[in-house]
Amino acid sequence: MYTKKIYFSGGDFHELQEVFAHLPGVVTTRTGYINGEKEAAYADVVSGKVMAYMGVEVIYNPKKMDISKLLDILFAVVNPYIPDGQGKARGPMYRAGVFYTAAEDEPQIQLHLNFIANRGKAPAVGNAQLTVNDPNSNPQLARKLYALAEKLQSFQPAEEDRQDYLSRNPDTPTYIDFAKLREYVRF
């Protein structure tokens, strides 16, 4: 079976793994540390001692799941307009991002992020609506996209006790509403 890999970050990597692990066409997922400056353990990354993005490796069958749907799902659960993190997971290691290995995926990812950056309108100010790409709008009030799109430099799988964490600990509180997600992800 032909498979491809893509890597996502944004908030708690345990939650991201749970999001992608059960999708049709996804073969396997692993939590880990993306584009780290050196090999690290969970405590090193969470404390900021070692810079790496906490994320998930998604291996999928592109004949059953395409990258566009994966990106839609990522940005349904991860807010790309927040600089560093989601929910209680805050800091540069929790930044939203898409990390690709195949050069052929870069244009699709850039197109998707460009669409997200320019969709909709910024919050209303008084009676005026400011659009994201309106040159006359106040740039401090317009939405800014913080999600990264980078070529993968390195991926270090997280420790074994960090793999499939929410499956093994179902009572763990989460930022993501998995009941709503299941309704959203009906293919």
Image (cartoon, grey):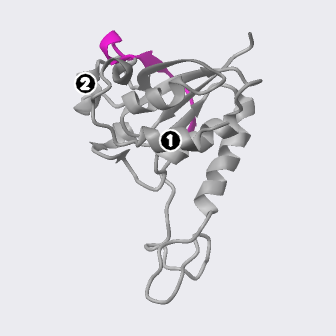
Decide if residue 132 is in sight here. Answer: yes
Please tell me in which quadrant of the rendered image residue 68 appears: top right
Count of numbered labels shown in the rendering: 2
Determine whether 54 is above or below 97 in the image. Answer: above
Report whether 106 appears left or right of 160. right
Q: Position of residue 127 (x, y in %)?
A: 49, 90
Q: Residue furthest bottom?
A: 127
Element class at badge 1: helix
Report whether 124 appears left or right of 106. left
Residue beneath the point at 68% across and 34% down: 67
Please tell me in which quadrant of the rendered image residue 135 appears: bottom right
Residue beneath the point at 53% across and 47% down: 76
Mark 1 crowd level (few <14, some 14–19, many ≥20, 10 Å Cα): some
Q: Position of residue 12 (x, y in %)?
A: 36, 35
- Residue designated by label 2: 44
Q: Which residues are magenta?
A: 149-163
Magenta stretch: includes residue 34: no
Assign the C terminus to one quadrant of the image.
Answer: top right
Please tell me in which quadrant of the rendered image residue 17 appears: top left
Q: Nearer the viewer, residue 91 or 15?
A: 15
Three-letter code, disc 2:
Asp
- Residue designated by label 1: 181
